[in-house]
Image (cartoon, helix red, strand yellow):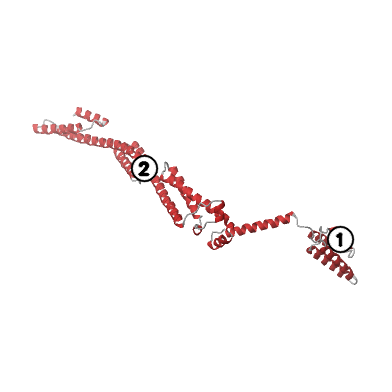
């Protein structure tokens, strides 16, 4: 390498010319001597000339040679340092990364020519395809297990997440690239995406079906929750009702809630779990509804008996009465007693009241 770089030579030459011009007549000889010395340094090989040597080369001819110019020339004459190498190294790395990034853009006009000329540049794409294909297969299997064989609402929720992840993996696979098998990559790492476009479409359809299934399952779970809430509220309303009308309203709501359970799709997890609970719900409802119906019937019999008794009591006022009227009064009392005897003993409270009235009548 020359002992004087071109840049340092130019700095010193420009300053020497300035000094020669300033000194005027007779300075041309001095300038030629300086130029000859500088040329000699440029032709020599070895260590770079330092500031002291450069100063000795020019200052005997031009004592007023600018020290600042000497300093700049010495700086320019230094060999490239580590920082310079790192700088250009980083620039090179960034440039290479940028070129690889452009080559791996998901556009056929870019990837196809690169895959034919320099397929090794597409290694990031190959890695991505491999990972996305493996991820899609794994997520589809997990989603199928969680959704189609769910044992809880949490399985449905997790299965829905797996379906979304599988869809994302499939979206990341370039369809136009599926038939391409990079030999170098497949030799070194093995390829797992060797499937056709038709198989890819089948995978998408499977994911689509599971998305629909997950939506149906979540919708059924929501309806089951609504039915459970309505059933619980109806039970509370029935227990809190203080009138017969209030009880009948609660019973109607209870029946509606049970109907909602029966209407859940039987192929869903919510429907299957509801079918297991439905017999118990219906048994409880029938028991309550039976009691309510019995109570209502008892109330009807007692009310009718009281009406007959009231009429008999009114007719018996202000005696004496003819025998025919007494016969009519007797028939009314007997009808009142007959109504009371129809009260079912299962309704304990109503039965006791009926027996007390029979004793009075």
On the image, which quarter does residue 248 sit in?
top left
**Left or right placement of residue 298 versus residue 32 in this view:** left
Q: For the residue labelled by badge 2, is the local secondary structure a helix, a strand or a loop?
A: helix
Asked if 31 appears above or below 329 in the picture, the reply is: below
Report the number of discs: 2
On the image, which quarter does residue 199 sit in?
bottom left
The numbered mark at residue 245 is: none
In this view, the residue farthest toward the top is 359
Q: What x and y, as percent, mark residue 329? A: 13, 33
Nearer to us in this view, 71 or 343:
71
On the image, which quarter does residue 276 sit in?
top left
The numbered mark at residue 55 is: 1
Q: Residues within 10 Å of mark 1 (few under 14, many from 20)?
A: some
Nearer to us in this view, 183 or 198:
183
In this view, the residue farthest toward the left is 323
The numbered mark at residue 272 is: 2
Asked if 86 appears above or below 17 in the picture, the reply is: above
Nearer to us in this view, 234 or 2:
2
Q: What x and y, as percent, mark residue 36? A: 86, 67
User: Residue at image x 26%, y 30%?
Assistant: 348
* Quarter of the image where the C terminus is located: top left
Asked if 148 appears above or below 170 in the picture, the reply is: above
| Any part of residue 317 in sight | no
Q: What x and y, as percent, mark residue 183? A: 55, 56
**Left or right placement of residue 35 versus residue 323 in this view:** right
Q: What x and y, as percent, mark residue 126? A: 55, 54
Label 2 – label 1 distance at C-alpha = 98 Å
* Quarter of the image where the N terminus is located: bottom right
Of tags 2 and 1, the one toward the viewer is 1
Q: For the residue labelled by badge 1, is the local secondary structure a helix, a strand or a loop?
A: helix
Nearer to us in this view, 130 or 256:
130
Label 2 or label 1, whichever comes before in sequence order:
1
């Amino acid at each position: 390498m020359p002992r004087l770089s071109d840049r340092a030579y130019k700095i010193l030459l420009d300053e020497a010319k300035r000094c020669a011009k300033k000194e005027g007549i007779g300075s041309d000889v001095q300038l030629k001597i300086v130029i000859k010395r500088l040329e000699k340094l440029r032709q020599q090989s070895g260590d770079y000339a330092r500031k002291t040597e450069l100063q000795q080369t020019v200052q005997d001819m031009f004592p007023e040679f600018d020290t600042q110019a000497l300093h700049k020339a010495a700086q320019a004459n230094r060999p490239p340092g580590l920082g310079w190498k790192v700088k250009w190294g980083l620039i090179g790395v960034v440039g290479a990364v940028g070129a690889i990034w452009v080559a791996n853009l998901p556009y056929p006009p870019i990837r196809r020519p690169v895959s034919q000329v320099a397929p090794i540049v597409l290694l990031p794409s190959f890695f991505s395809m491999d990972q996305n294909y493996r991820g899609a297969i794994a997520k589809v299997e997990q989603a199928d297990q969680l959704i189609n064989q769910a044992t809880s609402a949490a399985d449905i929720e997790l299965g829905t997440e797996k379906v979304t992840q599988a869809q994302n993996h499939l979206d990341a696979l370039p369809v136009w690239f599926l038939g391409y098998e990079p030999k170098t990559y497949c030799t070194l790492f093995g390829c797992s995406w060797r499937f056709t476009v038709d198989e890819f479409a089948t995978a998408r359809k499977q994911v689509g079906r599971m998305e629909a299934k997950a939506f149906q399952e979540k919708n059924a779970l929501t309806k089951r929750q609504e039915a459970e809430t309505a059933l619980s509220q109806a039970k509370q309303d029935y227990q809190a009702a203080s009138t017969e009308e209030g009880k009948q309203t609660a019973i109607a709501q209870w029946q509606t809630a049970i109907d909602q359970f029966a209407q859940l799709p039987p192929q869903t997890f919510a429907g299957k779990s509801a079918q297991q609970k439905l017999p118990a719900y219906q048994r409880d409802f029938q028991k309550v509804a039976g009691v309510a119906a019995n109570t209502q019937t008892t109330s009807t019999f007692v009310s009718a008996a009281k009406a007959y008794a009231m009429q008999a009591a009114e007719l018996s006022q202000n005696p004496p009465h003819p025998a025919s009227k007494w016969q009519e009064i007797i028939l009314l009392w007997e009808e009142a007693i007959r109504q009371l005897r129809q009260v079912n003993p299962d309704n304990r409270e109503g039965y006791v009241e009926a027996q007390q009235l029979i004793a009075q009548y």
